[in-house]
Amino acid sequence: MLAGELLGEIRATGAILSGRRTAEQADHWDGDHDGQGVPIFVLSHRPSDPAVANYPLVTYVTDGIASVMAQAKAVAGDRNVDVIGAYTAQRAIEAGLLDEVQIHQIPVLFGGGRRLFDVLSSRVELEIVRVIDALEATHIRYRIRR
């Protein structure tokens, strides 16, 4: 059930929305996140590097979280928009643009990185939708209460 459920979620993805730092650290997933063949939108304050032109599915958007989310949703249609990266998720939560948050918690403490919920401007109430506990990770899905 675990693998099938998570695979079904991947297949329900119609677009990826990522922050620039995350996208660049992942080398833009070689232009095709998890081999899904879906568009990747990158939220940034500045245009992409010229090398990104080698990845036709990757689009940089510099006019804010609402614009990049609208573009990703337009392309995704009735499928999901997956938001990747702490900064981008924080901006989307603050703007009221996310319905759910899924955390993949692995049993490793890195001791660094960007805290996912450290700089939210206000309290956000969450409701647990599902927990899948596996040997490699615990996958927790929350609905954002409004």
Image (cartoon, grey):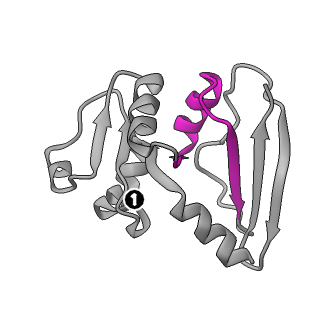
Q: What kind of element bears circle 1?
A: loop
User: Which quarter shows the N terminus?
Assistant: bottom right
Q: Residues within 10 Å of mark 1 (few under 14, many from 20)?
A: few
Foreground residue among 121 and 71: 71
**Residue at 35%, 50% in the rendered image:** 39
34 vs 135: above or below: above
Give the x, y percent position of residue 48: 23, 39
Give the farthest residue toward the front: 78
The amino acid type found where label 1 is placed reads Ala
Residue under numbered circle 1 = 26
**Residue at 43%, 67% in the rendered image:** 34
Residue 115 within the magenta-colored segment of the rendering = no
- Residue 132 found in image quarter: bottom right
Residue 84 within the magenta-colored segment of the rendering = yes
User: Which quarter shows the C terminus?
Assistant: top right
Give the x, y percent position of residue 110: 65, 60
Give the x, y percent position of residue 103: 70, 54
Quick check: 24 left or right of 4? left
Quick check: 92 left or right of 74? right
Quick check: 144 left or right of 71? right
Count of numbered labels shown in the rendering: 1
Q: Which residues are magenta?
A: 79-105
26 vs 132: above or below: above
**Residue at 67%, 36% in the rendered image:** 99
Foreground residue among 127 and 122: 127
Give the x, y percent position of residue 137: 73, 70
74 vs 9: above or below: above
**Residue at 28%, 41% in the rendered image:** 59
Foreground residue among 29 and 8: 8
- Residue 101 found in image quarter: top right
